[in-house]
Image (cartoon, rainbow, N blue to C red):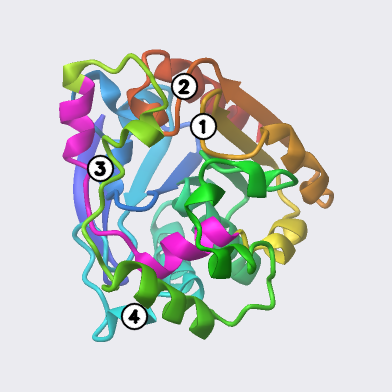
Amino acid sequence: MRRSDIEVEGLAATVVEPDRPNGRVVFCFPGGGMSRRYFDLDGTYSMAGHLAGSGFTVVAVDHPGVGDSPPPAEPWDLTPSYVADRDAGAVAALRTRIGGTAIGLGHSMGSMLTVVAQARHRCFDALALLGWAHGEGYRDTALAGHLSPEELALVGDPSVPEANIVELAKRRFGRPLPVGSTTTSEFLLGGMAVTAEGLEAIAHARSALLAVCGLASMLKLVGPDVAALDVPVLVGVGERDITVDVRQTAPSLAACPDITLYVLPGAGHNHNIAPNRTALWERVAVWAEGI
């Protein structure tokens, strides 16, 4: 396989090309506080390398303001619609260079942004949404417990203007791009037996957090975008993830022709350093080969 770092539409990306391409391209978008390196960690922790070994071309992209992708002049402009539009623009440009079936894969906040990009631009033929779920019961999760009463009152309301989310993010974070702390967070590891090598590997994926997008992801404002999805979707979470029960997601995906739900046993939120991470990667590969 071959790795190359590129710039496309102003965003940084890493392309991992297999020796024998299978005609499927997986575009990967990281979650809050992490860069594209989350998908291509050192050693045996590289999801990109694993998928490339099965014939997939993998493109990991840094959102604007994350990793090696520069922010706009006004970083508070990094709202979900802005970031999703920039991500979709990079995908469109790359699809003219790399043919084949395009699969959008996100992790956590990156899943939310992938959903928004698909709803606004229809840039993917299928979606793999990891560390993310959408449905009843969210207010009872530990993640929702981190919201203020004012924020909690907005959960699930798609009519909330992005300008309001920006103001709430200013109060919560103070800065538009605070330093992320999600890579080795005990809350996100969920008690997994992660090795010292795994913790060291994922530490290198640490990056700025998109404050507005991170808060928007916690507020679950994308119900209409989820309902509009009409391509095959895989939703994969850890057994000890921070999401709602993944089975609650299926009713929200009524327009999808193909829905796959997967739970990685014993795993927390940061699946790519879980002891059994390859089980998730293989499930994604088998699903994607059937698209």
Kind of residue sitting beneath label 3: Arg
**Real-space Cα separation, disc 2 to disc 1, in angstroms:** 7 Å
Decide if residue 20 is in sight here. no
Query: Measured along the vertical axis of the image, is residue 226 above or below residue 103?
Result: below
**Is residue 141 part of the magenta span, yes or no?**
no
At mark 3, the secondary structure is: helix
- Which residue corresponds to mark 4? 76
Q: Main secondary structure of the magenta part?
A: helix
**Real-space Cα separation, disc 3 to disc 4, in angstroms:** 24 Å
**Real-space Cα separation, disc 2 to disc 3, in angstroms:** 20 Å
Kind of residue sitting beneath label 2: Ala
Kind of residue sitting beneath label 4: Trp
- Which residue corresponds to mark 3? 37
- Which residue corresponds to mark 2? 267
- Which residue corresponds to mark 1? 241
Within the image, what quadrant is residue 274 found in? top left
Residue 23 locus on image (x, y percent): 50, 38
